[in-house]
Image (cartoon, rainbow, N blue to C red):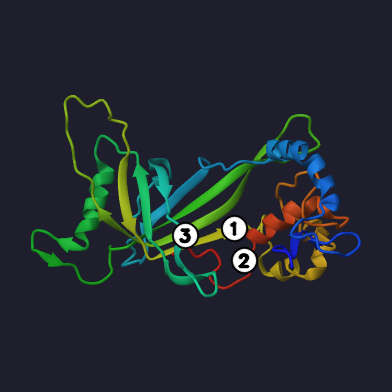
Amino acid sequence: MSTIDNINFGQGTIRSLTKEGTERAGQLDFDNFLHILDTYQSDAIDYLYDLEPRSQNLFWVGYFRQAVTHNGELRPFYNASYRINKISMPMPSMSLSIQNSLRAPIFDKVEFPMTVNISWHEDVYHSVHKYHLDWFARWYNRQYDVLRCGVNGKFRQLTIVAYLYINEDVESIIEVPSIQPIMAFKIGGLVPEKLPSMDFYHGSAQNDKTLDLTYKCGLIQWAYSDKIGLGQRAGRLFDPAIADNPSFVMDENNRVDIWNPEGFAQEGSQSPMENILETVRITRAATSHMVAEGALG
């Protein structure tokens, strides 16, 4: 018996057998795989050239305000979208260990950092710093050495929207760029963890340096635009029949505006509609179909 009985190649497997049915002692017959390697390099160049890279600088952050209204007070930070230069959200992680008897990774624990880092553009009035100092005082009053009761003024929330530009008129000689929101993040229960020091220095030439703050939060949710995902129609995307006819995501009633590469051999299907498999995969990723979908915290 060979060490490799069979190996997965898409729709089926390649067994380590000769044409006569005898064992190849761990060697594989790649005759049916050569056509993929023949076009791999040229297709990869075309695919990557057409691929839309991440646009990490196309985002909007706003609605920075109190999460719970108290007597109509929201304590908003007006125009936060112009002030926030960068925002970072750590992703969850799992701790795994290898079970020697099973030779398999076993789950130990999961960790959600629940930490958000924001870099602000400060002004000559140091108003960003003061806003956060006032916020800090809603938790602890230094003059009276007391903790404030209740939730009033203690928590903030914000919304992040990532977007891109798409060509609105594919028939036009000149592209017509149009904004398309991709996804949104809701962050709630924000609390500033530590305020940076206040420095004045005659020799400083870094007056445009950002003010970096770290927050703890209680909620981070990630959701896509309905122009990309399919919402409650998600079940159709996971129907086995879609593997043979994925054109469902391209018909007039369910059209989604997603990158659809052409001109290369797509991996994973012999379907006559295989030229839109990339669109199907992205649509699946952008469609909520399970409990706790998009929960980062």
**In-front residue for pair 247/100:** 100
Quadrant assignment for the N terminus: bottom right
In the displayed structure, would residue 7 be above or below residue 179? below
Q: Are marks 2 and 1 in contact (CB under 8 Å)?
A: yes
**Is 192 on the left-hand or right-hand side of 184?**
left
Query: Quick one: which residue is furthest to the bottom in this view?
Result: 101
Mark-to-mark CA distance, 2 and 3: 15 Å
- Among the two numbered marks 2 and 1 on one chain, the one whose residue lies closer to the N terminus: 1
Counting from the top left corner in percent of width and height, residue 13 is at 79, 62
Residue farthest to the left, as pictured: 144
> Which residue lies under the disc numbered 3?
186
Residue 71 found in image quarter:
bottom left
Q: Earlier in the sequence, mark 2 or mark 3?
A: 3
Name the amino acid type tagged 1: Tyr
Amino acid type, mark 3: Lys
Residue topped by disc 2: 288
Q: Amino acid at mark 2?
A: Ser
Measuring 49% from the left and 71% from the top, which residue is drawn there? 100
Q: In screen coordinates, is 20 left or right of 82?
A: right
Left or right of 6? Residue 89 is left
Q: Quadrant of the C terminus?
A: bottom left
Q: Residue at x 49, y 46 (%)?
A: 60
Q: How many marks?
A: 3
Mark 1 or mark 3: which comes first in sequence?
A: 3
